Image (cartoon, grey):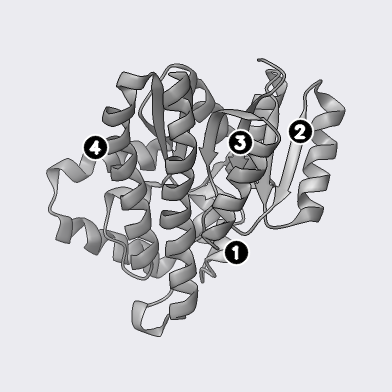
Amino acid sequence: MQKNNYVLISGATSGIGLELARLYAKDGYNLILISRSQNDLEKTKSELIKNNNIEIEIFAYDLSKIENAYDLYEKIKEKNFIVQTLVNNAGFGDSCEFVYADINRLNQMVDLNIKSLMNMCHLFAKDMMERRNGDILNVASVAAYLGGPYMATYYATKAFVLNFSIGLYHELKKYGVRMHVLCPGPTKTKFIDVAESQNKKAFNNISMKADKVAKICYKKVKRNKLIINTGFISKFTSFGTRFMSRKFAAKMTQKINGKI
């Protein structure tokens, strides 16, 4: 990769984002890492620089604040960095009956999971189209295939990510820009803590490790796969929901989320 070409990863200091950063670093890709915590970014940069001969830039931003996506883009342009691959991984969930949820937190979730992701795609896809080359990986979830009682807003945001990515795939491919969307099943990350789920043990019992999810995803991005499902639950759900009503699928999800 050219010296000024970079892979940009949001939510890069833990979970799937961190594991993807490790994989790209191992293969010699320069990185732009985004997270809210400057300390976590410094630690991640130190680890990756130590083990790989690459350039790493870090930016501490809360991307749930929409204006930060634009500020980040301008800083990257000022430094003449070329974002060859964009990984929109930042996002969070919430576990609660909708009417009892903190509406400010739900709005923040929508801003991060949907609006920020959309704006990042809008900003960087234009440059990729002009170069007629680039990759965009949006991280959705198995939740994208379902209605999700007790996590209704989160599930809806991931449905947006999936369908938005599929739409962009057909718009961008004629310009040489490759679109990918990851729909992992339950994964052992900080997600379950942030979502404040009531039964972490049950969740962890059905979860894949983040490094395994990242390895599957990384390989399929290289093979130019559009929709990337990882693990039995993700694959079963993406296939099984074709043969059941949305109402029935949501009822099953309600039972699962009620336990998790």
Residue type at the position of mark 3: Leu
Residues at badges 4 and 3 in contact (C-beta under 8 Å)?
Answer: no
User: What crowding class fits label 4: few (fewer than 14 Cα within 10 Å), some (14-19), or many (20 or more)?
Assistant: few
Which comes sooner in the sequence, label 4 or label 3? 3
**Residue 8 image label:** 3
Which comes sooner in the sequence, label 4 or label 2? 2
Residue type at the position of mark 1: Asp
Between disc 4 and disc 2, the foreground one is 2
Query: Where 104 sits versus 181, above or below?
Result: below
Residues at badges 4 and 1 in contact (C-beta under 8 Å)?
Answer: no
Residues at badges 3 and 2 in contact (C-beta under 8 Å)?
Answer: no
The residue tagged with tag 4: helix, strand or loop?
helix
Residue type at the position of mark 2: Ile
The residue that appears at 49% across and 18% down in the rendered structure is 222
Question: Mark 1 highlights which residue?
Answer: 193
Which comes sooner in the sequence, label 1 or label 3? 3
